[in-house]
Image: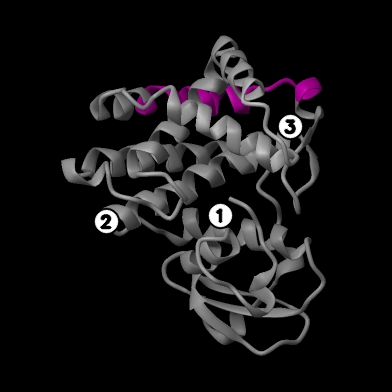
Amino acid sequence: MDIVDAVDVATVPAIGRAEAVPVATTENDRFTALLRALPADAWDRPTDCTRWTVRDVVAHVLGAAEGFVSPRELARQLRGTWAARPHGGMLAFVDALNEVQVRDRRDVPVAQLVERFATAGPRAARVRARLPGALRVIPVPFPQPIGRRDLAYGADRLYTRDIWMHRVDVGRAAGIAPTLTPEHDGRIVADIVAEWATTHDEPFDLVLGGPAGGRLRRGTATALHLDAVELVRLLSGRGVADGVLRHPFPL
Protein backbone atom coordinates (compact mmCIF):
# COMPACT_ATOMS: atom_id res chain seq x y z
CA MET A 1 0.00 0.00 0.00
CA ASP A 2 1.40 3.37 -0.98
CA ILE A 3 2.10 6.07 1.58
CA VAL A 4 -0.91 8.11 0.44
CA ASP A 5 -3.19 5.18 1.26
CA ALA A 6 -2.61 5.30 5.02
CA VAL A 7 -5.78 4.48 6.93
CA ASP A 8 -6.78 5.95 10.28
CA VAL A 9 -7.22 2.82 12.39
CA ALA A 10 -10.29 4.34 14.06
CA THR A 11 -12.13 4.08 10.74
CA VAL A 12 -11.59 0.32 10.35
CA PRO A 13 -14.95 -1.36 11.05
CA ALA A 14 -15.08 -4.44 13.25
CA ILE A 15 -15.92 -7.72 11.54
CA GLY A 16 -19.61 -8.21 12.25
CA ARG A 17 -22.07 -11.05 11.96
CA ALA A 18 -22.68 -10.89 8.21
CA GLU A 19 -19.03 -10.53 7.26
CA ALA A 20 -17.95 -13.18 9.78
CA VAL A 21 -19.60 -15.95 7.76
CA PRO A 22 -17.52 -15.67 4.55
CA VAL A 23 -14.38 -14.91 6.55
CA ALA A 24 -14.84 -18.09 8.61
CA THR A 25 -15.62 -20.13 5.49
CA THR A 26 -12.45 -19.02 3.74
CA GLU A 27 -10.33 -19.59 6.83
CA ASN A 28 -11.70 -23.09 7.40
CA ASP A 29 -11.01 -23.95 3.76
CA ARG A 30 -7.45 -22.66 3.92
CA PHE A 31 -6.69 -24.39 7.19
CA THR A 32 -8.01 -27.69 5.83
CA ALA A 33 -6.02 -27.32 2.61
CA LEU A 34 -2.85 -26.68 4.62
CA LEU A 35 -3.41 -29.77 6.76
CA ARG A 36 -3.89 -31.91 3.67
CA ALA A 37 -0.62 -30.58 2.26
CA LEU A 38 1.47 -31.39 5.34
CA PRO A 39 4.21 -33.98 4.83
CA ALA A 40 4.22 -36.89 7.26
CA ASP A 41 7.29 -35.64 9.10
CA ALA A 42 5.74 -32.21 9.82
CA TRP A 43 3.25 -33.36 12.41
CA ASP A 44 5.77 -33.81 15.21
CA ARG A 45 7.66 -30.58 14.57
CA PRO A 46 7.62 -27.89 17.29
CA THR A 47 5.64 -24.71 16.71
CA ASP A 48 5.73 -21.17 18.09
CA CYS A 49 3.15 -22.32 20.67
CA THR A 50 5.04 -23.33 23.78
CA ARG A 51 5.11 -27.13 24.30
CA TRP A 52 2.93 -27.76 21.24
CA THR A 53 3.82 -29.65 18.11
CA VAL A 54 1.93 -29.29 14.83
CA ARG A 55 -0.24 -32.23 15.89
CA ASP A 56 -1.04 -30.49 19.18
CA VAL A 57 -2.02 -27.26 17.45
CA VAL A 58 -4.34 -29.11 15.10
CA ALA A 59 -5.83 -31.09 18.00
CA HIS A 60 -6.60 -27.82 19.80
CA VAL A 61 -8.24 -26.25 16.73
CA LEU A 62 -10.26 -29.42 16.16
CA GLY A 63 -11.26 -29.60 19.83
CA ALA A 64 -12.54 -26.03 19.77
CA ALA A 65 -14.57 -26.74 16.64
CA GLU A 66 -16.06 -29.94 18.03
CA GLY A 67 -16.93 -28.09 21.23
CA PHE A 68 -18.96 -25.60 19.21
CA VAL A 69 -20.73 -28.36 17.30
CA SER A 70 -21.67 -30.52 20.29
CA PRO A 71 -22.93 -29.15 23.63
CA ARG A 72 -22.11 -32.54 25.17
CA GLU A 73 -18.51 -32.31 23.95
CA LEU A 74 -18.22 -28.74 25.22
CA ALA A 75 -19.53 -29.78 28.64
CA ARG A 76 -17.04 -32.65 28.74
CA GLN A 77 -14.16 -30.29 27.90
CA LEU A 78 -15.27 -27.83 30.59
CA ARG A 79 -15.49 -30.60 33.19
CA GLY A 80 -11.95 -31.64 32.35
CA THR A 81 -10.79 -28.05 32.58
CA TRP A 82 -12.34 -27.49 36.00
CA ALA A 83 -10.87 -30.79 37.20
CA ALA A 84 -7.42 -29.38 36.46
CA ARG A 85 -8.21 -26.53 38.93
CA PRO A 86 -6.51 -23.78 36.94
CA HIS A 87 -5.29 -20.80 38.97
CA GLY A 88 -4.40 -17.41 37.54
CA GLY A 89 -7.62 -16.00 36.14
CA MET A 90 -9.19 -16.36 32.71
CA LEU A 91 -5.92 -16.84 30.86
CA ALA A 92 -5.09 -19.86 33.03
CA PHE A 93 -8.58 -21.25 32.44
CA VAL A 94 -8.24 -20.88 28.66
CA ASP A 95 -4.81 -22.53 28.74
CA ALA A 96 -6.25 -25.44 30.72
CA LEU A 97 -9.15 -25.81 28.29
CA ASN A 98 -6.73 -25.84 25.37
CA GLU A 99 -4.67 -28.56 27.05
CA VAL A 100 -7.79 -30.70 27.54
CA GLN A 101 -8.54 -30.39 23.82
CA VAL A 102 -5.00 -31.45 22.96
CA ARG A 103 -4.76 -34.27 25.50
CA ASP A 104 -8.03 -35.88 24.46
CA ARG A 105 -6.97 -36.02 20.79
CA ARG A 106 -3.35 -36.95 21.26
CA ASP A 107 -3.81 -40.51 19.99
CA VAL A 108 -6.06 -39.67 17.03
CA PRO A 109 -4.36 -40.56 13.73
CA VAL A 110 -3.40 -37.48 11.74
CA ALA A 111 -5.63 -38.45 8.81
CA GLN A 112 -8.59 -38.48 11.19
CA LEU A 113 -7.60 -35.12 12.66
CA VAL A 114 -7.68 -33.63 9.18
CA GLU A 115 -10.99 -35.14 8.12
CA ARG A 116 -12.66 -34.43 11.45
CA PHE A 117 -11.73 -30.77 11.14
CA ALA A 118 -12.89 -30.69 7.53
CA THR A 119 -16.30 -31.71 8.89
CA ALA A 120 -16.39 -29.91 12.24
CA GLY A 121 -14.88 -26.60 11.09
CA PRO A 122 -17.71 -25.64 8.72
CA ARG A 123 -20.33 -27.01 11.12
CA ALA A 124 -18.93 -24.90 13.96
CA ALA A 125 -19.01 -21.83 11.71
CA ARG A 126 -22.68 -22.45 10.95
CA VAL A 127 -23.47 -22.84 14.67
CA ARG A 128 -21.75 -19.54 15.43
CA ALA A 129 -23.56 -17.78 12.59
CA ARG A 130 -26.94 -19.01 13.84
CA LEU A 131 -26.54 -18.07 17.48
CA PRO A 132 -29.80 -16.46 18.62
CA GLY A 133 -29.66 -12.82 19.64
CA ALA A 134 -30.36 -13.71 23.26
CA LEU A 135 -27.18 -15.82 23.35
CA ARG A 136 -25.05 -13.35 21.39
CA VAL A 137 -25.38 -10.72 24.12
CA ILE A 138 -24.33 -13.02 26.98
CA PRO A 139 -21.26 -11.45 28.66
CA VAL A 140 -18.12 -13.59 28.54
CA PRO A 141 -14.78 -12.89 30.26
CA PHE A 142 -11.80 -13.05 27.90
CA PRO A 143 -8.12 -12.79 28.86
CA GLN A 144 -6.73 -9.29 29.31
CA PRO A 145 -6.39 -6.87 27.66
CA ILE A 146 -9.59 -7.92 25.89
CA GLY A 147 -11.63 -8.28 29.06
CA ARG A 148 -15.37 -8.82 29.23
CA ARG A 149 -17.18 -8.95 25.87
CA ASP A 150 -20.35 -10.54 24.63
CA LEU A 151 -20.51 -14.01 23.11
CA ALA A 152 -20.97 -12.45 19.66
CA TYR A 153 -17.40 -11.15 19.86
CA GLY A 154 -16.05 -14.66 20.26
CA ALA A 155 -18.36 -16.09 17.61
CA ASP A 156 -17.77 -13.44 14.95
CA ARG A 157 -14.12 -12.53 15.46
CA LEU A 158 -12.08 -14.35 18.06
CA TYR A 159 -12.56 -17.96 16.96
CA THR A 160 -11.69 -17.32 13.31
CA ARG A 161 -8.65 -15.30 14.38
CA ASP A 162 -7.50 -18.29 16.41
CA ILE A 163 -7.66 -20.58 13.38
CA TRP A 164 -5.88 -17.96 11.26
CA MET A 165 -3.04 -17.57 13.77
CA HIS A 166 -2.65 -21.31 14.09
CA ARG A 167 -2.58 -21.66 10.32
CA VAL A 168 0.44 -19.38 10.44
CA ASP A 169 1.94 -21.48 13.26
CA VAL A 170 1.48 -24.73 11.35
CA GLY A 171 2.79 -23.30 8.09
CA ARG A 172 5.92 -21.92 9.76
CA ALA A 173 6.66 -25.22 11.47
CA ALA A 174 6.15 -27.18 8.26
CA GLY A 175 8.03 -24.73 6.04
CA ILE A 176 4.92 -24.06 3.95
CA ALA A 177 4.10 -20.45 3.11
CA PRO A 178 0.49 -19.67 3.99
CA THR A 179 -1.99 -18.64 1.33
CA LEU A 180 -2.53 -14.92 1.88
CA THR A 181 -4.78 -12.42 0.11
CA PRO A 182 -5.63 -8.78 0.83
CA GLU A 183 -9.35 -9.49 0.85
CA HIS A 184 -9.20 -12.20 3.49
CA ASP A 185 -5.95 -12.03 5.44
CA GLY A 186 -5.60 -8.28 5.06
CA ARG A 187 -9.08 -7.87 6.52
CA ILE A 188 -8.25 -10.08 9.50
CA VAL A 189 -5.00 -8.22 10.16
CA ALA A 190 -6.74 -4.83 9.95
CA ASP A 191 -9.44 -6.03 12.36
CA ILE A 192 -6.80 -7.22 14.82
CA VAL A 193 -4.80 -3.99 14.62
CA ALA A 194 -7.93 -1.86 15.04
CA GLU A 195 -8.87 -3.72 18.20
CA TRP A 196 -5.29 -3.78 19.49
CA ALA A 197 -5.30 0.03 19.15
CA THR A 198 -8.14 0.22 21.69
CA THR A 199 -5.94 -1.42 24.36
CA HIS A 200 -3.42 1.45 24.58
CA ASP A 201 -3.11 5.17 23.82
CA GLU A 202 0.18 5.41 21.94
CA PRO A 203 0.33 6.78 18.40
CA PHE A 204 1.66 4.49 15.69
CA ASP A 205 2.23 4.32 11.95
CA LEU A 206 2.42 0.72 10.76
CA VAL A 207 3.54 0.13 7.18
CA LEU A 208 2.77 -3.55 6.74
CA GLY A 209 4.23 -5.58 3.92
CA GLY A 210 3.03 -8.73 2.20
CA PRO A 211 -0.34 -9.70 0.73
CA ALA A 212 -2.04 -9.05 4.09
CA GLY A 213 -0.39 -5.66 4.46
CA GLY A 214 -1.43 -2.05 4.32
CA ARG A 215 -0.76 1.13 6.24
CA LEU A 216 -2.60 1.73 9.50
CA ARG A 217 -1.92 4.59 11.84
CA ARG A 218 -3.10 6.68 14.73
CA GLY A 219 -1.78 10.15 15.41
CA THR A 220 1.75 11.09 14.44
CA ALA A 221 4.57 8.59 14.79
CA THR A 222 7.66 7.39 12.97
CA ALA A 223 6.72 4.83 10.36
CA LEU A 224 7.42 1.24 11.40
CA HIS A 225 7.93 -1.13 8.48
CA LEU A 226 7.39 -4.86 8.92
CA ASP A 227 5.51 -7.78 7.43
CA ALA A 228 1.80 -7.91 8.32
CA VAL A 229 1.87 -11.51 9.56
CA GLU A 230 5.03 -10.85 11.55
CA LEU A 231 3.28 -7.93 13.24
CA VAL A 232 0.50 -10.17 14.49
CA ARG A 233 3.02 -12.79 15.61
CA LEU A 234 4.79 -10.17 17.71
CA LEU A 235 1.61 -8.76 19.22
CA SER A 236 0.54 -12.28 20.16
CA GLY A 237 3.78 -13.04 21.99
CA ARG A 238 5.37 -15.15 19.26
CA GLY A 239 8.60 -13.17 19.33
CA VAL A 240 10.23 -10.29 21.17
CA ALA A 241 8.45 -6.96 20.68
CA ASP A 242 9.45 -3.49 21.75
CA GLY A 243 8.32 0.08 21.25
CA VAL A 244 4.62 0.43 20.60
CA LEU A 245 4.46 -3.28 19.77
CA ARG A 246 5.20 -4.12 23.39
CA HIS A 247 1.46 -3.82 24.07
CA PRO A 248 0.30 -7.45 23.86
CA PHE A 249 -2.73 -8.81 22.10
CA PRO A 250 -3.31 -12.52 22.85
CA LEU A 251 -4.13 -14.89 20.01
Give me the C-alpha separation between circle 2 and circle 3.
Answer: 33 Å
The residue labelled by disc 2 is 176
Residue at 46% across / 34% down in the picture?
Answer: 60
Specify start and end residues of the magenta stretch as a single range.
117-135
Give me the C-alpha separation between circle 3 and circle 1.
Answer: 19 Å
Q: Is residue 133 left or right of residue 157?
A: right
**Res 108 → quadrant:** top left
Image vertical order of residue 195 relative to residue 70, above or below: below
Residue 12 at x, y percent in the picture? 70, 61
Q: Is residue 141 left or right of residue 71?
A: right
The residue labelled by disc 3 is 151
Residue at 17% across / 40% down in the picture?
Answer: 40
Q: Residue furthest top?
A: 72
**Res 68 → quadrant:** top right
Task: Look at label 3 and name its amino acid.
Answer: Leu
The residue labelled by disc 1 is 188
Residue 139 at x, y percent in the picture? 82, 32
Q: Which-is-in-front pick, marks 3 and 1?
A: 3
Q: Is residue 18 left or right of residue 120?
A: right
Kindly indicate whether the residue at mark 1 contacts the one at mark 3 (C-beta within 8 angstroms): no
Task: Look at label 2 and name its amino acid.
Answer: Ile
**Label whose residue precedes the other's in the sequence (2 or 1):** 2
Residue at 70% across / 51% down in the picture?
Answer: 14
Crowdedness near tag 2: few (<14), some (14–19) or many (≥20) residues, C-alpha within 10 Å: some
